Amino acid sequence: MALAVVLALGGETYLSKSEALKLVFPNGEEVEERWVDADPDVHRALEERCGVSPSRFLVYLGRRDGKIAGYAMILREITKTLPATFIVGVDPAGAVTEVAVLSHEEHIGGECRKERFLRQFDGATAASNLKVGGGGGVLPMSGATMSCNAVARAVRRTALFVKLQLVDKLQAREPVRRKKLLMGSFLEITADGDAAAVEKAFDAVKRVEKAISNYDEASELSRLHRERAIEAGSDLLAFVNDSLRYAKETGGAFDPTVAPLVRLWGFKEGRHRVPVDAEIEVALKAVGMSKVKVDGRRVALPEGVELDPGAIGKGQGVDAAAVALREAGVTRALIDFGSTQLAMGRWAVEIRDPFVEGKSLGTLTLENETLSTSGGYEKFFEKDGKTYGHILDPRTGRPAERVAATSVVAPTGAESDALSTAVYVDGKIPAGRAALLVRPDRTVEVAESLRAKFRRSGE
Ligand code: AMP
Ligand code: MG
């Protein structure tokens, strides 16, 4: 590539742009090229400390695992009368990591590309004394003072712009992304905010888990199951009240009292089996949210009645995470619990194809709302050529089998989560609900209200 470049007046090209970027980003970093405007305060600082300065720069952002790993700028500076081109690499803390010469047009001064000279800039920052000679911290190459001056100017300009505009402003606003295993699934939060805010959101989900887990013997729900009646804390109470509300709204298609049946089919412990009719009949006697009594904070369960939070818990978790983020001042975030996603602000999310793992069915745009997806593919077993899925119809005590997957968009996670399970059980989109369902024959039905937000893959 470099071979084809011929410069006037005997100037030389030493490195192509891509070779230069490889020097700065040698570890396969993902490199983004972007024009960045200097804010007025940054432009003023540049003119004061580096002389006449452009008001926007082409910068290269190197990322590893989505996080900024370094910056590069390629600058043209006049040496004597002709320009030379330099690349300067800077780390995320603002320290120079690399300086190299791409081209030098003047026929004298080319010695400025000697390593002995360039290595003097390693580790330099915007605060370093980068003047050449005369009390400056940089020693020139003899006979190449003007070119050496040009290099130092490029480094000063880059170090200052990167520190003031990129490290202090752009980098500080980069979203943080953290992932944690909670409620038996990975919760990934991407937020325009600091790591401390995201940690608070994780803590809020942990708090909900501690209240409503049916796997943790020490949870408040486990205590309710043992003691049958307790004064419930806010998170357990919210779970019970929301469950009452959505069980009623869905005519019992969603109903956490399905717990004894989930256990009977072996979905709780992962020891799957097909129960006989008589066992199902017995278990069904303990099903029905109306058996659960709430009086103020007091929750009471009749003997044999048990609650399974599996169909609404992650929804309640993302809601709690959103409250914590908002309290910490975050206004834009994606709280992704896999099967339930809450968007603060506008986000595009993928809905997975229930028939092909890793394939997307399409993209849905969410804005200050949540999406929940229920799928038979999540947990199922096969017996005698028949497939049994983990979502049960609380009225028959048997796996629902009308659909392959359902998705519901709603204002809160608890609502979308409960309803996606209910739509899965009933196999039809309730009037006025923003739902989508995939039939076993792979046809996709999309509610009118979702059509503008949903784009099918390949369309
Ligand atoms: P989801 O993935 O949100 O649809 O929740 C499914 C989980 O909720 C299952 O793995 C069971 O633990 C539980 N569950 C199964 N069927 C129902 C139902 N009809 N109503 C409420 N919870 C259910
Ligand atoms: Mg659900």
Image (cartoon, rainbow, N blue to C red):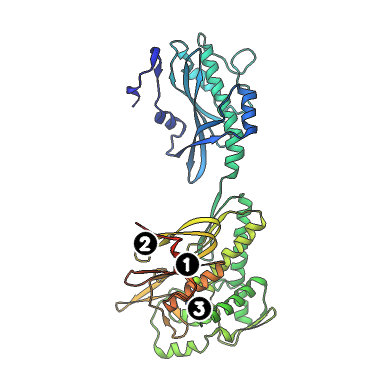
- Quote the CA–CA distance across marks 1 and 2: 27 Å
State which tag comes first along the sequence, 2 or 3: 3
- Quote the CA–CA distance across marks 2 and 3: 26 Å
Residue type of the residue flagged with mark 1: Ser
The answer to whether residue 410 of the structure is visible from this angle is yes
Q: Residue at x 60, y 13 (%)?
A: 133
Q: Residue at x 59, y 63 (%)?
A: 205
The residue wearing badge 2 is 357
Q: Where is residue 161 shown, x and y percent of the image?
A: 58, 31
Residue type of the residue flagged with mark 2: Glu
Question: Is 181 rendered above or below residue 292?
Answer: above
The residue wearing badge 3 is 254
Asked whether, in this view, residue 277 is left or right of residue 136, the answer is left
Looking at the image, which is closer to me, 435 or 290? Answer: 435
Which part of the image, by quadrant, shows the N terminus? top left
The verdict on label 3 being within 8 Å of ligand 1 is yes
The verdict on label 2 being within 8 Å of ligand 1 is no
Looking at the image, which is closer to me, 261 or 6? Answer: 6
The answer to whether residue 266 of the structure is visible from this angle is no
Q: Residue at x 49, y 46 (%)?
A: 66
